[in-house]
């Protein structure tokens, strides 16, 4: 378990990490045969600033009201880069801890400052709990790393976002599909807030589990009735847009363009 304050990567460390990811992960993405998207085209409003939630691979991201399109893009692209490179570099069931550590370092490489992060793995007996509730509990625990009005916004956004997912069929369908992994299932919830100094806070709760129960729907509808190996991670990050430099942005955009865009979907929650 780690609990570290204000940890940043140096410029050289960040660029070296990103370059390694691009070198090893881009060929994997480009070698994949074109995949058929599982969802029909979604009609998005002309004013995309009205959208306050997104699916990014297997993570549900909730944004507070009034956040700029620029910050939303930064959050989505950096999260996507960290998450997908971690999956590519550490794809095996027994590599859960390495996958989590890579994710945290990937966020830092893209400009986020790590405030807290922790990771645990254990055997658990679930009875009547949906995985969405488990992840939301992790998020709420991680929010303790924030203070004042930021913490209040983070809690509100987390609750509204995961509740709204159930009322967005296209988003829920994609979330379920992206969450099904070769080693079991994985899902995350990221909630975002912005403080008066314009620093952005992000809290992530993530869980992966392995079970013989054969769950096919992981978010709301299938409940865990048997023992499972569960891995949980939580992290608190901050970023200011100047920390997302042009070279980092170019790499994140190139990575996203090469990846399957069907892995991401924006939607609105009332």
Image (spheres, helix red, strand yellow):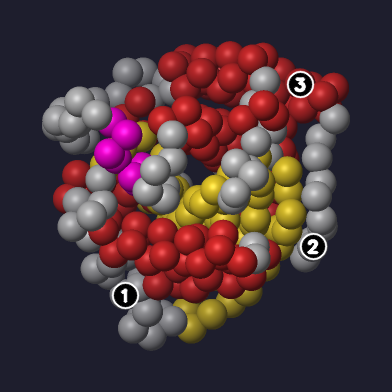
Residue 25 in sight here: yes
Q: Residue 188, image x and y in percent? A: 47, 55
Are dots 2 and 1 in contact, CB under 8 Å?
A: no
Q: Please identify the quadrant where the N terminus is shown.
A: bottom right
Residue for point 51% across, 67% down? 152
Counting residues from the N terminus, which is met first, the one under dot 3 or under dot 2?
2
| CA–CA distance in space, label 2 to label 1 | 32 Å
Front residue (pair 92, 158)? 158
- Which residues fall within the magenta stretch? 48-54
Q: Name the residue under label 1.
A: 223
From this view, report whether residue 188 is shown above or below residue 135. above
Q: How far apart are marks 3 and 2 (CA)?
A: 24 Å
SS at badge 2:
loop
The residue tagged with tag 1: helix, strand or loop? Answer: loop
Circle nearer the N terminus (1, 3): 3
In reply to whether residue 193 is colored magenta, the answer given is no
Q: Label 1 neighbourhood size at 10 Å, few (<14), some (14-19), many (20+)?
A: some
Residue 50 in magenta stretch: yes
Indicate the quadrant where residue 78 lies.
Answer: top right
Residue in front for this viewpoint, 71 or 66: 66
Q: Is residue 178 visible?
A: no
Residue 115 percent across, percent down from the top left: 74, 54
Name the N-terminal-most of marks 2 and 1. Answer: 2
Residue 129 horizontal side relative to residue 90, left or right: left
Which residue is under mark 2? 3
Residue beneath the point at 14% across and 30% down: 43
Q: Where is residue 247 shown, x and y percent of the image?
A: 67, 14
Q: Does residue 15 appear to the left or right of 251 in the view shown? A: right
Is 40 displayed left or right of 257 in the figure? left
Q: Name the residue under label 3.
A: 15
Residue at position x 64%, y 56% in the image: 235
Residue 25 falls in image quadrant? top right
């Amino acid at each position: 378990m780690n609990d570290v304050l204000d940890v940043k990567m140096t410029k050289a460390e960040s660029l070296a990490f990103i370059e390694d990811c691009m070198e090893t992960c881009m060929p994997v993405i480009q070698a994949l045969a074109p995949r058929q998207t599982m969802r029909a085209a979604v009609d998005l409003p002309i004013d995309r600033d009205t959208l306050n939630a997104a699916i990014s691979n297997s993570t549900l991201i909730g944004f507070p009201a009034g956040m700029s399109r620029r910050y939303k893009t930064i959050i989505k692209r950096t999260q996507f880069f960290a998450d997908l490179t971690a999956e590519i570099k550490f794809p095996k069931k027994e590599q859960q801890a390495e996958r989590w550590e890579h994710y945290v370092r990937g966020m830092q490489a893209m400009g986020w400052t790590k405030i807290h992060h922790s990771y645990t793995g254990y055997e658990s007996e679930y009875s009547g709990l949906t995985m969405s509730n488990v992840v939301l509990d992790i998020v709420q625990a991680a929010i303790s790393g924030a203070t004042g009005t930021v913490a209040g916004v983070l809690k509100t956004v987390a609750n509204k976002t995961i509740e709204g997912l159930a009322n967005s069929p296209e988003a829920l369908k994609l979330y379920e599909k992206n969450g099904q992994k070769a080693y079991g299932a994985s899902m995350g919830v990221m909630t975002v807030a912005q403080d008066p100094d314009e620093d952005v806070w992000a809290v992530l709760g993530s869980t992966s589990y392995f079970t013989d129960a054969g769950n096919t729907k992981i978010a709301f509808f299938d409940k865990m009735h048997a023992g499972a190996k569960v891995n949980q991670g939580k992290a608190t990050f901050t970023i200011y847009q100047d920390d997302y430099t042009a070279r980092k942005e170019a790499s994140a955009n190139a990575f996203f363009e090469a990846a399957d865009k069907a892995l991401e979907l924006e939607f609105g929650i009332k």
